[in-house]
Image (tube, rainbow, N blue to C red):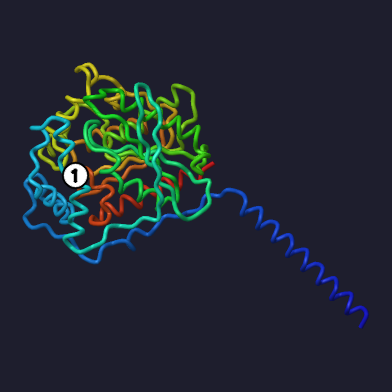
């Protein structure tokens, strides 16, 4: 009987020690920062209704997806004057694709997406003035969170962080990271390369102030659409050349990567909407100081030096004048030794990203982009 008691006591002591060891290990793992996969299944947010266009597919896009066409039709219903007939100040008053998506949802009695994200604003000093940052932080979790800087589209001339509010919300929520949307100054008031300089100032601010927004300065990526995609690639090159911390990843969504408007996609999609060949020429006219800027590698990325850049994701779409230059960009970056992942989405046009509330291909692209960022954030 005495032996049995000793055995029981011995077993009890062993179990207690093991439990204490397990608890200590669990606490240590809890305290240590570890990025976890947070991607949201995009199919769960698919609307219950399908968005059907009112008219036939246009001549420039016979295979356009119905949901994409429905958005373009809604944009046309506002009867805004064509971009190329307006001054930049006038053009900034036109409706946006974001307006079209919101009104299309209202037409179908569907509530706007609600994101589990908190936002705050921050003004920072730049050469010659200030710019505004909008910071998107996940409501769940304690951080420190990974950080992505986001740069909006608009040809460097129109639009802003309000019109492109969806993408940073979506990416912040799906990656469980902080997104910083950068309100860089626009041309022609602030011509090339002001947008790049503003972007670089925002990047340096994020590196220096990450802890103040509960972010991880060692886990930072660059993201952007169209003109914003151009800015992303440029900032990585600038970080390399100025010998400051490199971003962990570049996410360039249909970036403006060249200045040749005679490529195959410019010819095939000359009349595409919302971005046409004429519209791109209009944007470049107001952005550049002189024609010599068209041969600057910061604008014509296809002649830039990509050596040493971080892994890059490039998203393209079929019905887009810039598709050819984006494919060339991916190939040139690969040739320079950059790890490049690229996905093309058929039947959709420029600016489709961020429209997952309506367009299935956008939901797929958003999930793919989030997956790429998560993979980058997890890497040491």
Q: Which residue is mark 1?
A: 96
Q: Quadrant of residue 10?
A: bottom right
Residue 340 in view of the camera = no
- The answer to whether residue 298 is above or below residue 214 is above
- The answer to whether residue 258 is above or below residue 44 is above
Q: Position of residue 298 (x, y in %)?
A: 31, 24
- Identify the residue at the far right of this view: 2
Q: As rendered, which of 76 and 125 lies closer to the eye?
A: 125
Q: Quadrant of residue 334?
A: top left
Quadrant of the drawing holding the N terminus:
bottom right
**16 to the left or right of 183:** right
Q: Quadrant of residue 27?
A: bottom right
Q: Position of residue 304 (x, y in %)?
A: 33, 24
Q: As rendered, which of 361 and 79 lies closer to the eye?
A: 79
Residue beneath the point at 45% across and 42% down: 147
Other residues around mark 1 within 10 Å, as few (<14) / some (14–19) / many (≥20):
some
Residue 220 in view of the camera = yes
Q: Secondary structure at mark 1?
A: loop
Residue beneath the point at 31% across and 54% down: 364
Residue beneath the point at 46% across and 35% down: 206
Residue beneath the point at 41% across and 25% down: 238
Q: As rendered, which of 127 and 365 lies closer to the eye?
A: 127
**76 to the left or right of 156:** left
């Amino acid at each position: 009987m005495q032996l049995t008691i000793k055995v029981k006591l011995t077993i009890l002591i062993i179990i207690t020690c093991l439990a204490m060891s397990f608890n200590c290990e669990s606490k240590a793992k809890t305290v240590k920062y570890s990025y976890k996969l947070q991607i949201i299944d995009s199919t769960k947010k698919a609307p219950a209704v399908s968005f059907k266009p009112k008219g036939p597919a246009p001549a420039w896009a016979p295979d356009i997806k119905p949901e994409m066409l429905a958005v373009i039709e809604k944009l046309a219903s506002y009867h805004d004057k064509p971009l190329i007939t307006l001054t930049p100040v006038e053009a900034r008053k036109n409706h946006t694709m974001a307006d079209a998506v919101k009104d299309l949802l209202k037409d179908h009695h569907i509530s706007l997406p609600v994101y589990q994200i908190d936002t705050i604003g921050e003004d920072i000093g730049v050469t010659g003035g200030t710019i505004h940052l909008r910071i998107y932080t996940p409501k769940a979790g304690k951080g420190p969170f990974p950080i992505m800087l986001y740069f909006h589209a608009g040809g460097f001339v129109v639009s802003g962080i309000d019109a492109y509010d969806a993408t940073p919300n979506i990416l912040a929520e799906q990656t469980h990271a902080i997104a910083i949307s950068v309100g860089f100054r626009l041309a022609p008031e602030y011509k090339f390369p002001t947008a790049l300089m503003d972007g670089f100032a925002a990047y340096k601010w994020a590196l220096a102030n990450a802890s103040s927004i509960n972010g991880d300065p060692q886990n930072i990526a660059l993201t952007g659409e169209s003109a914003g995609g151009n800015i992303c690639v440029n900032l990585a090159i600038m970080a390399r050349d100025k010998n400051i911390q490199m971003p962990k990843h570049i996410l360039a969504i249909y970036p403006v990567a060249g200045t040749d408007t005679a490529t195959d996609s410019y010819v095939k999609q000359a009349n595409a909407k919302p971005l046409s060949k004429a519209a791109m020429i209009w944007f470049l006219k107001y952005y550049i100081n002189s024609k010599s800027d068209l041969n600057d590698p910061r604008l014509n990325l296809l002649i830039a030096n990509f050596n040493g850049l971080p892994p890059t994701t490039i998203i393209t779409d079929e019905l887009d004048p810039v598709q050819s230059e984006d494919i060339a960009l991916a190939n040139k970056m690969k040739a320079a030794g950059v790890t490049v992942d690229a996905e093309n989405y058929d039947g959709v046009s420029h600016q489709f990203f961020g429209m997952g509330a309506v367009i299935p291909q956008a939901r797929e692209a958003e999930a793919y982009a989030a997956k790429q960022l998560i993979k980058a954030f997890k890497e040491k």
